[in-house]
Image: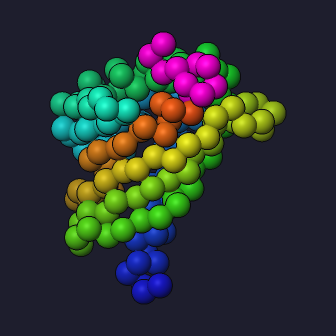
Amino acid sequence: MSLALTELRADLDAWCRSYVTAFESYDAEAIAAHWTFPALTTQVGRSFTFKNAEHFAKNTGLLLGFYKAQKVAHVERRVAEHLPMSPGAVSMTVQDRMLDADGNEIAAWKAAYILQNVDGAWKAVAAVADGEVDAWAARGTPLGG
């Protein structure tokens, strides 16, 4: 792997660690700080746009409430693969695992992101959350249900 790709991978790993910390803290504003706006998320045939961080954080607060109800205590995320799209943009697939306080897996899925480098920091622009929606539905606890 070239030095540039190694540095990019290190940046993406750091972004994921920071994102996980925000999720484990149930901090919707800190999660929103990982995004640039407007932003787009898609899930199983539906798309949602978020015009600003406040709009995104409000929706994320609802998601965090769902996670609390499912007893999510720890989150694991690893970069499965990434593809540079331009010097300032990258696509990335991640593997997520939600764990309870004892470390037992509650749900797991893959998700895809497009990130853009904004003023020297990687920010998500879009996410495909089909895997998450499917994982929760398979568990009998559908998102939004």
Q: Is residue 51 toward the left or the right of residue 134 in the image?
A: left
Magenta: main secondary structure:
loop
The x, y position of residue 110, in whole percent, is: 51, 47
Residue 11 quadrant: bottom left
Outermost right residue: 102
Outermost bottom residue: 2
Q: Is residue 58 above or below residue 125?
A: above
Q: Is residue 50 toward the left or the right of residue 80 in the image?
A: left
Q: Depth check: 83 or 4 in front?
A: 83
The x, y position of residue 41, in whole percent, is: 31, 36
- What residue sits 26% from the left and 63% below the top? 89
On the question of residue 95 being in view, the answer is yes
**Colour logic:** rainbow
Q: Is residue 35 toward the left or the right of residue 20 in the image?
A: left
- What residue sits 48% from the left and 30% below the top? 133
Asked if the stretch drawn in magenta spans residue 4, the answer is no
On the question of residue 11 being in view, the answer is no
Q: Is residue 52 toward the left or the right of residue 143 in the image?
A: left
The x, y position of residue 135, in whole percent, is: 56, 33
Residue 58 quadrant: top left
- What residue sits 22% from the left and 59% below the top? 119
- How many marks the image carries: the answer is 0
Q: Magenta residues, as a range?
A: 136-145
The x, y position of residue 80, in whole percent, is: 52, 61
Q: Is residue 117 above or below residue 8?
A: above
Asked if the stretch drawn in magenta spans residue 143, the answer is yes
